[in-house]
Each structure stands twice: as C-alpha cells, then as structure tokens.
Image: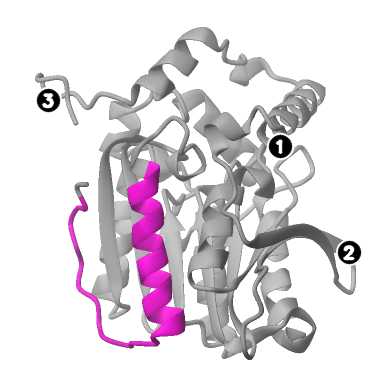
Amino acid sequence: MNDGTGIERLPLGIRLLHAVRKAPDWPTMTADELAAFRDAENRKRSSRLGRVITGRPAHGVAIRWREVTLPDREVRVREYRPSNEHGGDLPLVLHVHGGGFVGTAVQCDWANSHFAASLPAVVVSVEHRLLAEGTPLSAAVDDGWDVLLHVVRHAADWGVDPARAVVVGESTGGLIAALSAIRAKASGLRLRGQVLVNPATDLTETMFDDPSVTRHADSPTLNMAQLQLFRRLAVPPGTDARALSPLLTEDLGGLAPALVVLPTVDPLADQGRRYAERLLRSGTPARLTEHPGAPHGFLSMPGLVPQAKAARREIAEFLRDRLVESRPAAMKSKKAARR
C-alpha cells in the first residue's frame, strides 16, 4: 500500500511502536551493552505480553525445548508437534529464527505452531548461537546445519520421515537455511524444499549497494546502523564473506525448490530478489512473492503486521505441496502476491 505519493506506508502498529520506542545507539554499543540489550529483548519476545506482537500459538500443538547433543557441543531447539496422534512418521520442518545478534525461537511460535498443526509436521526450530564478539556467523550456520543432520540421522528418535524434510529461515535464519540447502546438495541429503523469508544472502561489502538499502536505510525494523553492526559481527577480519553469502555461491543448480517471501519495506529486499533470480537462472525451481507495505521481520509480528497472515498461508501451501501431497511440479517465478 502507499500514501498516494508512491511511498509505501507501514502498518499503523509498526509506526506507533517505532514512535514510542527508543532505538539503541548501534554504532557505539559495547559488547556488554549488546549482551544486555539482547537478553532484555529476548525476554520481551518470550513473555506473555510479547504475544501481543508475536502472536499466539495454534491450539493442538505441543511445544517444548529439547537439547541436541552434538560431538562438540549442545544446541537447544524448540520442538512443535501436533498433539493428535498421526499414523507413521511426520515430515520435518527445520526452522531457523532471525535476528542475528538478537532473537529466539520463541518469537516464531505463532507461525511454527500453525505449520505443525496444519500440515501436520514436526517443526524443529534451532536456538542457534547469536552473533557477538568472538561468535561470528559461521557458528550459527554450523548450528543450523548440524542440527538438521542430527535430526535426519536420528529420525526415529524424533518421529520424523527423513525423506520428507525442508528448511525454513527468516532473515539471518534465511541465510542459514539457504546455506543448509547448498550443503545438503553437496552432501547428498535430498531436501524437499527451502523457504527463505526476507533472507540475507550477501555479506560482502557489496551488500550495502542495493537500491533497497538506500531506500529503506531508516526502516523501523532494520536500519543501516543495524546492518553495519550485523556485518561487523558476522564476518570479522580474516573471514571469507563470500563463503557465507548464498548469493555468491558459484553453482546454485540442483538445489531444493525454493519459496522466497519478501516484505517490500526492507533494506534486504533486493538481496532476496536477486537470489530468487539466480536460483531460477541456475535451474533450481523458485517462486518469489512480495508483500507490499510489510517491513523486515514481519512474519514474527502478526500482531502488528496484517500481511503476516497471508505470508503464513502461502508458506503453509508451499510446504504442503512439498511434504504432504509431494507434487514435484516445476514452479515458475511469481513476481508478487498482493493480498
């Protein structure tokens, strides 16, 4: 939507929240200040009051924390499982939340619980390591991939069908999901699909060159200062940013079919568009949908952003086609979904 001048107008709830909320001074934030902000913010997102923004979980779904024991560490995950008994093993949806240096799987309870109930499926959301000094993005990427491999290899313990698995990610989680799909191809793990919601796909210095970054540099849910902090923590000096940038992967052919879901009021929107285009040019089935007027991170804010419901429906339909009906029909690019 726009205000008649061609400028897209954000939902009222986002505008009100932005008006009353004081943003941190991102460029000067110390490591201790970032840790304190992250802990306070994640407590808010996990609170009952936070449900006003993040949405209430679906009925008929059991939600619990579990620990995934890996050879060198433990990773906490949030499991969503339909309460009603279903015959046989259920499909697996491996989900990765967004936020980068802040965020928790709890903020995604609304969408993930509905996916678990409606498909039905077991959704496993990775509480990956958050970016900080000494914890680059590669650590979070490894958490996402290693949990996926663990659950697939121990499918019987999780009650899932390893032949029916997809990855879903939002923002930083979208990047992790995209890299997991690339690793899956290299390792011979066949995924049924990948869903990338407002994903970051380029961590090189060129990430700031997109027109959407300039146009939405002061977006209330993701601004230029946050992006600069994100990149500084994600790829510290000596890190190969290209290796963590799905957009710059040389061969994107033969990957799991993709659904790329974009809000239009988002500095990262052009990254998502370019990635969908590259997937298609490489021969990987991909569909791109856009939600005009929605801001970055909108899927985890259904209480403020009406477009989140339409996005949840289209993701559920894509997952159902890939996991339940198992229709392998080729997909064509779809420029926009205006609902």
Question: Which label belongs to residue 73?
Answer: 2
Which label's residue is closer to the chain start, 2 or 1? 1
Q: Which residue is mark 1?
A: 46
Q: Quick check: marks 2 and 1 in contact, CB under 8 Å?
A: no
Q: Which residue appears at 19% of the width and 62% of the height?
A: 334
Q: Which residue is mark 3?
A: 6
Horizontal side of 184 relative to 263 (left or right) equals: right
Where is residue 241? Give x, y as percent.
55, 53
Quarter-of-image position of residue 333:
bottom left
**1 vs 3, front mark:** 1
The secondary element bearing badge 3 is classed as loop
Horizontal side of 333 relative to 115 (left or right) equals: left
Q: Quick check: marks 2 and 3 in contact, CB under 8 Å?
A: no
* Mark 2 residue type: Arg
- Residue toward you, 96 or 156: 156
Local packing at callout 1 (Cα closer than 10 Å; few below 14, some 14-19, many 20+) is some
On the question of residue 244 being in view, the answer is no
Q: Is residue 291 magenta?
A: no
- Residue toward you, 85 or 210: 85
How far apart marks 2 and 1 lie (CA) works out to 24 Å
Where is residue 172? Give x, y as percent.
55, 49
Q: Which residue appears at 47% of the width and 30% of the height?
A: 222
Where is residue 266? Give x, y as percent.
36, 36
Please give the range of residues in magenta.
308-337
* Mark 3 residue type: Gly
